[in-house]
Structure formats: C-alpha cells, structure tokens
Image (cartoon, coloured by chain):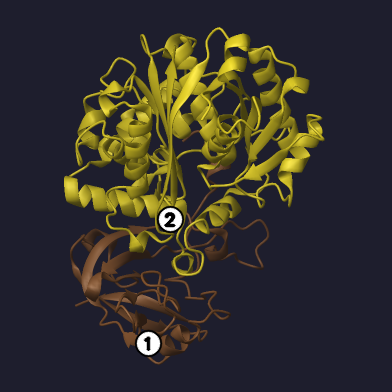
Amino acid sequence: MWEELDRWWPSISSGGTNMEFKNFSIAIGQTKVARFVDDLVAGKIMSTSCKRCGKRYYPPQADCSACMSSDMEWRPVSGEGKLVTFTKIYVPPEHFAVRQPLMPFSSVQFEPCPIGIIEVEDGLKVMGWMPKIDLKKIKVGMKLKALPQILPDGKVTIVFEMV
Amino acid sequence: MKKVAIVGIGHGKFGVRSDASLRELTFEAVKACLDDAGVPLKEVESMVTGIAGDEFSIALQPSAQVHDYIGFQPRPNFRVEGACATGSMALRTGWMNVASGLADLVLVVGVEKMTEVPTSVATDIMGRGGDAMWEYPFGTTFPGYYAMIANAHMAEFGTKEEQLAMVAVKNHFYGSLNPYAHMQKKIDLEKALTSFTVAYPLKLFDCSLITDGAAAVLLASEEKAKAISKKPVWMTGLALATDTIRITDRESLTSIKASREAAKTAYKMAGVKPSDIDVATVHDCFTIAEIVAYEDLGFCEKGEGGKLIEAKETYAEGKIPVNVDGGLKSKGHPLGATGVSMAIEITKQLRGEAGERQVKDAEIGLSHNVGGTGQVVAVHIFRRD
C-alpha cells in the first residue's frame, strides 16, 4: 500500500474494544413523529398510514405526499421481510468512531457490524443492523425479521434476526 | 431561448492542496479560464459559484470569498448546491443566465476544499448527505450506500468484484495521463482487488478521492461566442432529475432512476440517442456507480455494465469512451468542482485538445453528474460545430 493512501483513508479498526453496533440516536425529538422512539422502546416498529388515501410510510411521516393530507394514523410494521441489500462499513463516520479517551494518539477503534435493508409488507423498507449474522452468511433475498433493541445505555435501535 | 456555448475553460491542479485556500484555488482556475477564452474579467457580466459544503472549509458565505478574491464586485454572483452534482448545478444556472438573455458572458466556478478536515470528518459530513434523520443512525457513509447498490447489482446480474476493479484500472490509466489529476498513477487488477475493504464489497480502489480543487468555464451567447471563440462547444441538452432522499425508498437499488430520467430528457432536448455519444464523463464516485451509469445512460443493456468494462468498450478506442480524464476515481472529486471539470474534459475532447487521451473525431459529448446517491442528477450534452 502506498504511503499517501493513508492520508486519504486513515487507519481503521486496529482491534480494541468491541462496539457491536451503535445506538439509534435519531434526531427526531423535535418532529411530529417523535413518538416513534417511544414505540420502539415499547417493542414496536411503527409506520404511519394516510387516512384519506391509505398510503403507508416507513419511516413514519406526519404528512402524506401522495394526497397532501395530514390526517394520519399509526400502524405497526410486521417486521418480517426479505433482504434487499446489505453492506458492512469498515471505515465509519466520525460520529461512530469510538476513541480511547486515555490513550494519546490512539487511532480510531471500531468493530464494524453489517447493516441492511429489508422489504416488509406494502413495499415498506426497513433499515437495520445485523449484529448476530456473519457477513459470509448474508444473502440478498434471505428472510429476516426487524426488531427494536434497547442498548445498555438506554438508547434504542433496530436489528435484524434470522427468521 | 438563446444558444449557449462554452468559450473558455480553466482547470486547477486537483489534489491535497494544503498550499492554497478556497479563494486561491478559485483564482487559479478563473485565470486559466479567462486566458483560454482571451477575455478580460471586466467583460464578464455575471457569475455563478458551485460549492457543496460549508463544513469542509468552515465558511457561511464561501461564494463571497471567491468573488471578492477575483475582484468581481459589484456584479452578480451567488452560490448553488447539489451535493456531488454541485458543479453541474452551477453550469445549469450559468446556462439559464445566458439562455434567458439576462447576460451574454457568464463565469461558472466550481470549487471545494475538502482536506482541511480529517478523512473521518469528511466521511461523516458526506454520510449525512443521505437522510441524516433516518439512515445516518445506522452508521451510513457514502461508500456504504454505494456498497449496498453494488451488492444488489451483484445479486441481480452477477456483476463481479473483478469487473468493479476493471473500472478502477481504466480510470487510473487515464488519470496517469492527466496532469491535473489527483493521483497520476496506474494500478493493476491485483492492486485494486487486494486493497482493504472500505464498505463490503467496495475496496479502497473502488472509491473516488477526497480532493481539493477548482474548475471554471466561461459561457457565452451565440453572438458573443462567434466573436470570441474559434472552437465554441455548444451545450445542446441539459436535464435535471430528482429522486427520494432515502435509498430505502427507491424503486430499484440496481439503477439510479434520476439518471435515467435526466438522460431521457437531455437526449430529447439535444435530438440525439446514446449511440450518438462519442465521449462521456460519468459520475464514478465509486466503481459500481460507473457500471450503473453505463446502463442508466443507455450505453448498454440493463445488467450488462460489468461486461461492457470487461470488453474494454469504455476505453478511448472502444465503443463508448468513458472517463478518459481519469474520472472522479483518479482525477479526484472536489464536490463543487467535479461537474465543471467534467464539462472541461468534454470541451477539450470536442476541441481535439485532449492530447494522449484524445478520442478520435469526437463531435458529441455527454456529462453525467450524480448528487448524493441520486437525489439529484444532471446530464448535459455538448456538441462542436
């Protein structure tokens, strides 16, 4: 590897703490769909559905772009579906890169976790982490189930498990 | 609508330009552009500046830095933005200025200084170019998004990692012949295939470069163009199309729908078809993106993009030469400058001034510039007299 490459893509995982997956610290607190997180904590993945034209939205929307109505209702997502695609990101964004605070000059520490998109009912697509599935065993089209998961620090995210 | 031509081109050196500021990079490109056109800046009536991010070089009003440094005041200048397609948005806005009759000579500048922040921060900034609210919490990055497109394409059409690497080998070959390219080095298939994984299945050499750079073109109305230039290059087809912010909401993950829509509109406006294109610059932010672009632009059938590069049909001697300037892959991808740089390469090719990289008798060219993961796509068609 040429030395200059390191300048563009600095070193990534060099072992250390295992960060299996990151919390779902979504920035939706100040939106009209903020209850989505409370529902996740209660174990449900919720979508919205337009009461006028019936169009469903996941992630939930407070407004319907199909008929411009804002009369929406909440409906649970079954969570079971087929894997549309996936990846495993080895070079994480800064926010997800965990640094060792007491180690001067330490490099980024991160244990990557695969992510994917599954298509559930009504063509809805859900993104999630796959912390328990080996990358080599992941195949487009495989059946998975999306589940909320509460992390040790109380934050919540969505994971996929084998059906 | 008035006819619009490119009558001047100026390309700065792309690379890690810690020797120059945003405004100094712009000056290099603008000076080269005005010299090429043989037009003094005082004759230019209006200006458009394309800069994608405020965060790379911390500036709330970067376009003002730029017009001040070249001494453009009090004439009009404003900034446009369309993520990685920002340069093409600037070009489109400049074209609108001339086509509408608002001005006869318009300077279009694209510039970005991305390396003032560490790579991990740049990755973070670009990752939030997707849906920061709903996708970014899953640690998405741009390589991650395109890796998901790659895995979908490989699963549906049997596209191989080797075919992705072949795009990198081609673009590095041409980058080695381009003095303005960030990385002027050839690579072989093995080097590409054995580089470390950034986001499975994309490896280091599947990714374009984080780059500093500027590019500028001068646009003119027909009367002005004929008075100024011996070799005007006409912009005969311009199209812009949009798609959903989230890739989860896309109809297909093996195609960029906005590319297909923009291509259809641009071909219609220019009165040409894909087989008429002699040379193209396409948005190869990742190798898979170039393969998908071959298909979306109609250079081959859907799913056949991998085979097209394997048959070397996108080399300068092939059926449809693509990114013979090195592409984003090897020339580099300074977001705001990229679309303008693409137009410069096509202009050089149509003028017959591309040197070793020249496509024989090129008459009609196309540029294809994708913003983000296809939220906004510009396709432009160019023609010489």
Q: Is residue B40 above or below residue A128?
A: above
Chain ID for yellow: B
Callout 2 environment at 10 Å: few (<14), some (14 to 19), or many (20+)? Answer: many
In percent of the image, x 18 and y 66: which residue is there?
A142
Q: Is residue A95 above or below residue B301?
A: below
* Residue B325 horizontal/vertical position (percent): 45, 23
Nearest the eye: A156 or A100? A156
Q: Which disc, if any, is residue A73?
A: 1
Q: Quadrant of residue B195?
A: top left
Residue A118 shows in this picture: yes
Classify mark 2: helix, strand or loop.
Answer: loop
Q: In the rendered image, which residue does mark 2 sit on?
A: A90
Disc nearer the start of the sequence (1/2): 1
Residue B21 shows in this picture: no
Callout 1 environment at 10 Å: few (<14), some (14 to 19), or many (20+)? Answer: some
Left or right of residue A105: residue B315: left
Nearest the eye: B183 or A39? A39
* Residue B185 horizontal/vertical position (percent): 47, 24
Q: Colour of chain A?
A: brown
